[in-house]
Image (cartoon, rainbow, N blue to C red):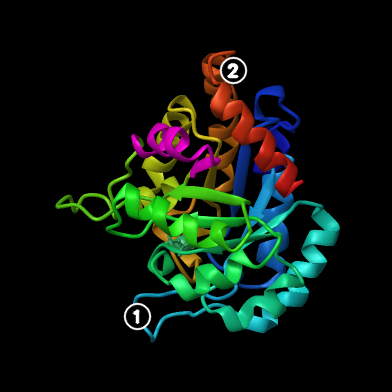
Amino acid sequence: MPYSEVTPRISPQPALRRFSLIAGPCSIESFEIFHKVATEVKRLGATALRGGIFKMRTRSDTFQGLGPEALSIVQHVKKDVGLPFVSEITDPRQIDLLAEVVDVFQVGARNMHNYELLKELGKLRRPILLKRGLAAYLDEFLAASEYIMKEGNNQVILCERGIRTFETATRNTLDLSAVPYLQKRSGLPVIVDPSHGTGVRDLVSPMCWAAAAAGADGVMVEVHPEPSKALSDGAQALTFEDFAQMVPRLAKVLEAVEGPTFEIQEHARRKMSQWIN
Ligand code: PEP
Ligand code: MN
């Protein structure tokens, strides 16, 4: 039986209402693939889409993203699917182009220290999803967020995406203690990216649940219909089936941990849902 016939529509789930579930491919590869992923993750409960247009790849001979070619793809898919779109900006010269389709500008881990980029994004009035640098102390991460806010843009979402440690079994070491630390110190929404945080597909769903249990305001995950054929980060991409299994348990964890004690978080989540939706 095709997979789509066995999985019920999951959204809307009350527990997911104030939690951001951002999902999509690492990179936008084609209209067909992006449309398929977007439709499916929305059906299963995603609240926003992700997809790289400009990529920061370690090696220059690997896929660097479709660049401007992706714009019409995103426009079409957003119109059809109706979810906000998160994508990475790698250079201030991309602002005008990306502003046509991007609802939330992502600053990648490799650019957390690019203060000129942060200052330019601080002049915008759109949310900025700032990722923690590969080896950044939490206080350096918070200091980077100040570069954006100092220019007048307070719509900053912090994203823990794993850091470099001596461990090699995982791509990075996901630091979930960052979640309550950053929330308490900044009052900003804090989300977790377990795809880059682990680099290992089988670890992504458990770390989504753990992030929710730690009080994160959202998670961002990579999803691909055929991870083995993905042009980037296939090893960490969830399949549709993985995503369909992850979401209901995420909702259960959220129900279990939500309560009146999470005031800072309530505040941050309310802010984030105003910015994104
Ligand atoms: C990404 O989100 O695709 C990405 C490149 O993330 P990071 O900057 O965390 O490596
Ligand atoms: Mn990726």
The reply to whether residue 176 is in sight is yes
Q: Amino acid at mark 1?
A: Arg
User: Camera-side residue: 272 or 170?
Assistant: 272
Q: Which mark is residue 197?
A: none
How many tags in the picture?
2
Q: Position of residue 75 (x, y in %)?
A: 79, 69
Q: Earlier in the sequence, mark 2 or mark 1?
A: 1
Kind of residue at badge 2? Glu
Q: Residue at x 69, y 82 (%)?
A: 69
Q: Residue shown at 66%/30% (left/top)?
A: 16
Task: Residue at 48% x, 55% y: name it.
Answer: 145
| Within-10-Å neighbours for mark 1: few <14, some 14–19, many 20+ | few
Of the 4 image quadrants, the one containing the N terminus is top right
Residue position marked by numbered label 2 in the rendering? 255
Magenta range is 177-191
Residue labelled with disc 1:
59
State the image quarter where residue 79 is shown: bottom right
Report the front residue among 247 and 92.
Answer: 92
User: Quick check: marks 2 and 1 in contact, CB under 8 Å?
Assistant: no
Asked whether 104 falls inside the magenta stretch, the response is no
**Residue 184 spot, x, y in % from top left:** 44, 32
Task: Judge left or right: residue 195 versus residue 166.
Answer: right
Q: Main secondary structure of the magenta part?
A: helix
Q: Quadrant of residue 102?
A: bottom right
Above-or-below relation of 129 to 45: below
52 sits to left or right of 100: left
Q: Is residue 33 above or below residue 39?
A: below
Residue 179 rendering spot, x and y as whole percentages: 42, 36
Question: Which residue is at 66% across, 73% downward?
Answer: 30
Circle 2: element type: helix
